Amino acid sequence: MDKNREYFIIENHSIIKKVRIIKFIGGLYTINIEGTSKYLRVHPSRIYSTYTDASGAAGSGKNKYGTERMKNGQLL
């Protein structure tokens, strides 16, 4: 994955955020969430190259808990 290119992650199993990759160390990416000063270290499987890929994963149960256990974006 390229640095300083737009990528997307899913936060709280339903919210899609635009991020930028800062660096890759120890099997984890350090990312910056756009519009904030928030930095996270995430596994490569949490990063999506397009918004449609991320929205498909958020709505299809491909995430860890699945959407059938969700109500209003909260895990039941």
Image (cartoon, helix red, strand yellow):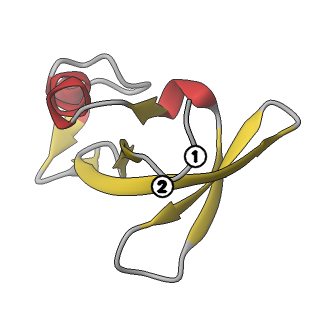
Specify the label residue 20 is tagged with: 2
Which quarter of the picture shows residue 66? top left
Q: Is residue 67 above or below residue 51?
A: above
Q: Secondary structure at mark 1?
A: loop
Specify the label residue 74 is tagged with: none
Q: Secondary structure at mark 2?
A: strand
The percent position of residue 70, horizontal first and vertical second, equals 20, 39
Which quarter of the picture shows residue 14? top left
The percent position of residue 17, horizontal first and vertical second, equals 30, 56
The answer to whether 76 appears left or right of 73 in the picture is right
Tell me the amino acid under the disc marked 1.
Lys
Q: Earlier in the sequence, mark 2 or mark 1?
A: 1
Q: Nearer the viewer, residue 5 or 19?
A: 5
Q: CA distance from mark 2 to mark 1?
A: 7 Å
Q: Is residue 17 above or below residue 13?
A: below
**Mark 1, other Cα within 10 Å: few <14 / some 14–19 / many ≥20:** few
